[in-house]
Amino acid sequence: MNKKPPRPAKAKSTRSVPRRKLGPFLRMVWDHKIVQKVETRTLTLADGTASTRPFSFQLVNFTALFLVFAVFWDMIVGAYFRKTSLWLFFRRVPNFFNILEKMVTTLDFAYLGNIIDPLIDTVQMAILGTAIGALFSLPVAFLASQNIVKNKAVSGFFKVFLSLVRTFPTLVYAAVLAFVFGYGTLVGVIATSIFTFGIMTKMLYEVIETLDLGGFVAIEATGANKVKAFVAAILPQIMGSFLSFSLYNFEINIRASAILGYVGAGGIGILLDENMSWREYGRIGVIMLTLFVVVILIENVSRYLRRRLS
Amino acid sequence: MIAFDHVSKIYPNGTVALKNVSLEIQQGEFVAIIGLSGAGKSTLIKLINKMTDVTKGTLIVNGANVSLLKGYELRKFRRGIGIVFQSFNLINRTSVINNVLAARVAEMSTLATLFGLYTKEDRILALESLHKVGILEKAYMRADQLSGGQQQRVALARTLAQSPKIILADEPVASLDPITANQIMKDFKKVNVEENITVIANMHHVDMALKYADRVIGINAGEIIYDGPSANVTEELLKKIYGRDITDEDIMFKDQ
């Protein structure tokens, strides 16, 4: 009936895709992606029943708002008041390629002999630190799990304690501990284990708190105390996660311990620091290449093992 | 022996679960507790091993005043009482034998528990328990790979490994199909007769209760309506216990 007149042949030939109007698109964005309009909260069904969705911000709205805010902050506040901005990044990118070129063209493979020992130190720091941290994480995860320790004050105390532990990265711990224990690998081990402990414990108690406690309750009912019931009924259920988290933390730690030498914790970081100050780009290149190979190797072995576990 | 003397249970939210209940259960009895949901069946069972505490009156179990037990004394007392849950409550992700052995940890040191250092006697006891309920061949399978009926058998074996005097069963067959339920009840009966273990079971289905229990306790709104041999339970009585006619839902085998 109300048919539109046929399009002119010219328009057809120039555009194969029909033009989308901007209006409806903006409306859609406005309706769903940025701010939920009040009218859309109530939907009416065929028989007249109305269903009202309670007002809530959607995750996507927040993401969009945050991105807009971040760009705004960087362009206006960052660039004009603090002199730091993403623009700086784009201006300096060529420098990176200059240094990279120097590294690659002067690679000093004779230096490899000096790397091996510190590299072994670095890997050892990561292994020991992960093992010690993981070991301590089990009992504390028990104490921080609210469904096991019914007392909210106790589990809450440990949760707060753990979030305090997690405040600092490995590097900060190592820097502080170097004053106490002197320079050396020991500091790296302790710093790594503290960091691992903080992360592992949180990951573990989060798993424990979602577990089915039927077995635990049953073992408690046989007259076992909480610790024994935990060991007998909870440990078998979290052992897979525990090993998987340990490997994952080992991956993080191997990367973190590479720079620990900067603050005096031993390992390959010392060499990196040294050669950076001497601008020995060829040696830095070799160190980075070695690190790259080791990290990739460990990461892949670990990922393979973790996949086997799950 | 279990003796309830004018026991009442009022929950903190004001719900009166049991009113002035007095009864005695001798060693080796098979007692079924029947009644509507919310009548107080579960509460009655939970009081016996102090999963919940008595509000008024006294409850004596094997010579101990239950409401006075605390800490180590309570844990020691609980070793003599096994519980079978409606949802089996097995430890997933571990073997059947480890599930049964877990009943022994109460009497082991924490270190031995940590490293799984069970004694040879404990291992044999666990295997014997599995043998009694007829699933010895599943001992080294993972518990969560078994069927519902098999899982409940593991739970019963775990309870047996505790060498209990009393087994409490909270709706032990309510989540099983009729055939399996019958087999599980037979296992309970066997344990009851052969080992002289007192069995106290909450039963959802009237016919199963009457078939396997020697004695039936009927509860309605926290009060005991009937307490006597299951042979003497009449249609009239069931009407009083349930406050209505018995429907198909209360019976597992509808053709009987």
Image (spheres, coloured by chain):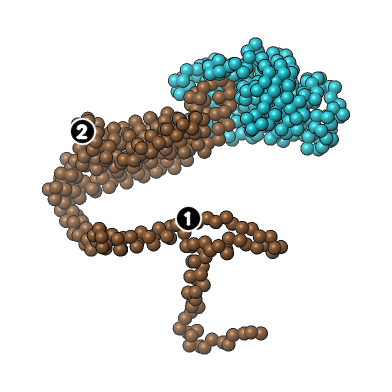
Chain colours: A brown, B cyan
Q: Residues within 10 Å of mark 1 (few under 14, many from 20)?
A: few
Q: Quadrant of residue A44?
A: bottom right
Is A235 or B201 nearer to us in this picture? B201
For badge 1, the amino acid type reads Leu
**The residue tagged with tag 1: helix, strand or loop?**
helix
Q: CA distance from mark 1 to mark 2?
A: 45 Å
Mark 2 crowd level (few <14, some 14–19, many ≥20, 10 Å Cα): few
* Same chain shared by disc 1 and disc 2: yes
Q: Residue at x 45, y 83 (%)?
A: A14
User: Which residue, given by chain and number where applicable, does mark 1 sit on?
Assistant: A59
Residue at mark 1: chain = A
For the N terminus of chain B, the image quarter is top right
- Residue B65: image quadrant is top right
Q: Residue at x 33, y 60 (%)?
A: A73
Horizontal side, residue A162 vs residue A280: left or right: right
Viewer-nearest residue: A129 or B148: A129
Instruction: Return the x and y of residue A188 as percentages of the image width and height.
Output: 26, 35
**Is residue B153 visible to us here?**
no
x 22%, y 61%: residue: A92
Q: Is residue B235 left or right of residue A245?
A: right
Q: Is residue B11 visible?
A: yes
Position above or below: A169 against A56 = above
- Residue B228: horizontal and vertical position, in percent? 81, 20
The single residue placed furthest to the front in the displayed view is: B14
Q: Residue placed at 70% from the left, 29% from the top? A: B16
The residue at which mark 2 appears reads as A179
The tag earlier along the polypeptide, 1 or 2, is 1
Residue B19: percent from left, percent from top: 73, 24
- Which of the labelled discs sits on residue A183, or is there none? none
Q: Chain of mark 2?
A: A
